[in-house]
Image: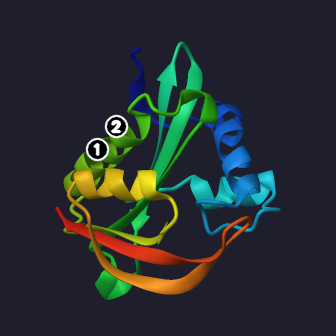
Amino acid sequence: MTYEIRPARASDWPGIWAVLEPVIRAGETFTWDRDTTEETARSKWLKEAPGLTFVAVRDGDVLGTGELHPNQGGGGSHVANAGYMVHADHGGQGIARALCAYSLVAARDAGFKAMQFNAVVESNVRAVGLWQSMGFRILATIPEAFHHPTLGYVGLHVMYQEL
């Protein structure tokens, strides 16, 4: 199954929201409030340079999305941060891996020196394993820093890789 990854367009927003909303509402993998409004999600997810929002699309349908931005301002702005979400109907197709790979190249091209994930939910073992297979390492785990809706308090990993 083929798909294209490209920078997001304004016309992609309905498809992006269709990916984001179920993930946000589930509250299992992202630290966003489960009642985040579409307007708030849009303002948080859509980035401006040097940040970037991108999508995986097939036949005009958004299958997944990612965003890239400086992890911190000022003296920390050379380290990127990114997030990815894939529509549940398209999991297991390599889309998250492709979105991450795309963001690593884009971050490097934008002059970032490293990428850091601040809050990878420890119980999201599929994502943790994927990020590790792509060269990220766990620098620290903050115990019980995430309140999972069914598992209770679980750790958050800080993951990092040099670009």
* Image quadrant where residue 161 sits: bottom left
The C terminus: image quadrant: bottom left
Disc on res. 101: 1
Q: Amino acid at mark 1?
A: Ala
Question: Three-letter amino acid code at disc 2?
Answer: Ala
Secondary element at tag 2: helix
- Position of residue 60 relative to residue 99, above or below, is above
When the figure is inspected, residue 149 is found, relative to residue 64, above or below; the finding is below
Q: Residue at x 39, y 66 (%)?
A: 81
Is any atom of residue 155 visible in this view? yes
Would you call the spot at circle 1 few (<14 residues within 10 Å), some (14-19), or many (20 or more)? Answer: few
Please give the residue where the numbered disc 2 appears in the rendered image.
98
Query: Marks 1 and 2, Cα distance to the nearest angstrom?
Result: 5 Å
Q: Are marks 1 and 2 in contact (CB under 8 Å)?
A: yes
**Residue 13, percent across and down?**
66, 38
Q: Position of residue 130 (x, y in %)?
A: 34, 50
- Residue located at (35% from left, 41% from top): 97
Name, please, the residue furthest toward the front.
Answer: 151
